Image (spheres, rainbow, N blue to C red):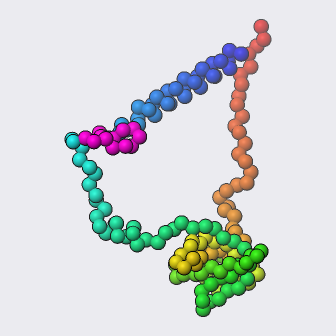
Amino acid sequence: MKTSHIYLLSFASAFTLLCSSIAQSAKPAPAGTAATGITTPSSDVPPPADTAGPAKKKASATAPKTNGFPFRGTLKAVDKTAMTLTIAGKEKDRVVYLTSETKFTKDGKSATISDALVNGEVGGYARKAKEDRTEAISVRFGPAVKDATKTSAPKQPKAVKVKAEPMP
């Protein structure tokens, strides 16, 4: 019974020590800012300089939005001249437009639109573009490839050695 109290006390001490060392190593907020990040008026602290310049602002204004959504289904048709894929749907088929920036993969390797198989599995990531068109950012032909680095078996917890005390 005393051993469990010693383990609990040592764990609590180590945890307290760790928390205090983290608190001491944290950088204080710069002058003129509160801990919440709200700037307070201060005459001795100049505002941060804009180092990005107009070129950075212009590039971010013209960059396309990357907000998108995943898609998957059965490939019903491929139109290489119109650069579209038709994905079969329950009620309505979906047309996905391909662009010059669309990335194609098959079996985890780079592919082309020629690798598409009608009635095969297709998936990818798309975004809404002008005129309510769905444009593909990436397209995967065939089933998804499982990542070999991830293991499906959960890790086993480490065994804890408990020292037995003699009974009085």
Does residue 135 appear in the picture of this structure? no
- Of the pair 69 and 138, the residue shown nearer to us: 69
Quarter-of-image position of residue 147: bottom right
Residue ranking furthest to the bottom:
81
Q: Position of residue 110 (x, y in %)?
A: 60, 77
Q: Choose top left, top right, bottom left or bottom right for residue 59.
A: bottom left
Q: Position of residue 62 (x, y in %)?
A: 40, 72
Q: Position of residue 9 (x, y in %)?
A: 60, 20
Please report the residue visible at 31 percent of the width from the left and 41 percent of the height from the top: 40
Q: Quadrant of the N terminus?
A: top right
For the point 70% across and 69% down, the residue is 144
Q: Is residue 13 magenta?
A: no
Q: Is residue 119 visible?
A: yes
Instruction: Please state if 33 lies on the left or on the right of 96 as rendered.
Output: left
Task: Answer left or right for 82 relative to 59.
Answer: right
Horizontal arrangement in the rendering, residue 2 relative to residue 9 (left or right): right
Q: Which quadrant, please, contains the C terminus?
A: top right
Q: Is residue 80 above or below residue 156?
A: below
Q: Residue furthest top?
A: 168
Question: Principal SS element in the magenta part?
Answer: loop
Instruction: Please tell me in which quadrant of the rendered image residue 163 appears.
Output: top right
Please, is residue 97 above or below residue 58 in the view?
A: below
Residue at the (69%, 37%) spot, across then down: 158
- Stretch in magenta: 30-42
Instruction: Determine the residue positioned at 71% across, 45% down.
Output: 155
Q: Is residue 98 left or right of residue 33?
A: right
Inspect the magenta stretch and tell me whether residue 37 lies in it: yes
Q: Nearer the viewer, residue 47 or 117?
A: 47
